[in-house]
Image: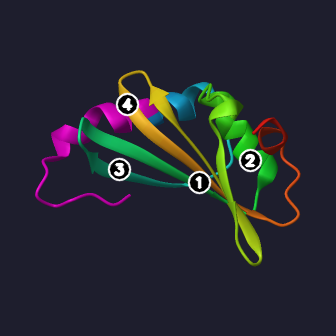
Amino acid sequence: MYSDTNERLYSQVAARTALLALASNVTGLPAANVDVNPDHDGVRLDIHIHNNPDGFEWWREALALDPADARFRTHSDFCTVQIDGTAGTVTLSLVGYLPLPVDVPVLSAA
């Protein structure tokens, strides 16, 4: 996890608590890279899933993010899918770095 060292650890409590609650309630979630970053409303969780379309979908469902909100970009050899939302009072961004061709339900809904 990355954070601006000018911020106080306490400013990240809500984001870290939301992440711990999710990990406790949905124990089978695949590992992800998670960053806690400053945001205009406090802090934001950035959750990154690499090369795991099913894992991305599992995280999306666990976070109750609407697939209609997905934005994606195709690159030369991979695709990025991003959905922004909230978990309680915490702003978050779920980003998948997925191999091509991408066969993820969230993309077919976008």
Label 3 vs label 4: CA separation? 10 Å
Q: How far apart in space, not on screen, are marks 4 and 2 (Cα)?
A: 21 Å
Q: Quadrant of residue 52?
A: bottom right
Left-right relation of 68 to 25: right
User: Tag 4: residue type?
Assistant: Val
Q: Of the residues under marks 4 and 1, which one precedes in the sequence?
A: 1
Q: Which residue is mark 2?
A: 55
Q: Give the number of the mark in front: 4 or 2.
A: 4
The residue pinned by badge 3 equals 36
Does residue 51 appear to the left or right of 84 in the view shown? right
- Secondary structure at badge 3 equals strand
Q: Is residue 2 magenta?
A: yes
| Res. 73 image quadrant | bottom right
- Residue plotted at (85% across, 41% down): 108
Residue beneath disc 4: 90
Task: Kindly report the distance in space between the C-alpha atoms of the residues bearing marks 2 and 3.
Answer: 20 Å
Q: Nearer the viewer, mark 4 or mark 1?
A: 4
Where are the magenta residues, as a range? 1-18
Q: Is residue 49 magenta?
A: no
Residue at the disc numbered 1: 32
**Residue 6 image position (x, y, % from top left):** 10, 58
